[in-house]
């Protein structure tokens, strides 16, 4: 199956695919381990005192909602960033110095991506 993509699109996607390797190598095992640990802590806490578990659930539900909204926003920003990255490769593929221009993104997106990076790593 051939998709007939531009060289710039293929090169940018190959560059971005390198981010998947550290994610699956380091982050997925960490997330799995932490999920299992949290699950057993919840069970132990429920056995000891169900009122504390209920209070934790009341606190956790808004946090879950906030995390969902945050992750959707970050996904949108990352898509914009990846599209701009493809645009940069497209500029290199054209080999036209007259058409080259700055591809600096908006400051707000860069700031949110930096915050996401600092919170994640």
Image (tube, rainbow, N blue to C red):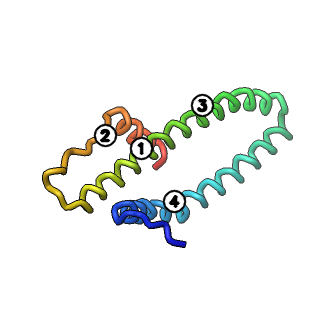
Instruction: Point out the image quarter for the N terminus.
Output: bottom right
- Which mark lies nearer to you, 2 or 4? 2
Along the viewing direction, whichever of 55 and 16 lies nearer the viewer: 16
Where disc 2 sits, the SS reads loop
Which residue is depicted at the point 32% across and 35% down?
Answer: 106
Q: Residue at x 61, y 36 (%)?
A: 68
Which numbered disc, 1 or 3, marks the residue closer to the eye? 1
**On residue 105, which mark appears?**
2
Q: Earlier in the sequence, mark 2 or mark 4?
A: 4
Earlier residue among tags 4 and 1:
4
- Residue 114 lies left or right of residue 55; in this view the side is left
Q: Secondary structure at mark 4?
A: helix
Q: CA distance from mark 1 to mark 3?
A: 22 Å
Give x and y (percent) for residue 16.
42, 59
The residue under label 4 is 23
Tell which residue pokes out farthest to the bottom in this image.
1
Label 3 – label 2 distance at C-alpha: 26 Å
Marks 2,1: beta carbons within 8 A: yes
Left or right: 47 with respect to 101?
A: right
Q: Which residue is mark 3?
A: 66
Q: Residue at label 1?
A: 80
* Disc 2 to disc 1, C-alpha distance: 9 Å
Q: Earlier in the sequence, mark 1 or mark 3?
A: 3
Residue furthest toward the left?
98
Name which of mark 2 and mark 1 comes first in the sequence.
Answer: 1
């Amino acid at each position: 199956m051939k998709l007939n993509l531009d060289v710039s699109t293929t090169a940018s996607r190959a560059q971005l695919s390198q981010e998947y390797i550290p994610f699956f190598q380091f982050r997925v095992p960490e997330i799995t381990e932490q999920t299992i640990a949290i699950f057993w802590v919840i069970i132990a806490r429920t056995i000891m005192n169900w009122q504390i578990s209920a209070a934790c659930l009341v606190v956790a539900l808004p946090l879950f909602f906030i995390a969902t909204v945050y992750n959707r926003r970050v996904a949108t920003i990352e898509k914009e960033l990846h599209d701009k990255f493809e645009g940069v490769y497209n500029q290199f593929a054209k080999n036209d110095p007259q058409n080259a221009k700055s591809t600096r993104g908006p400051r707000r997106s860069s700031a949110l991506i930096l915050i996401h990076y600092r919170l994640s790593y």
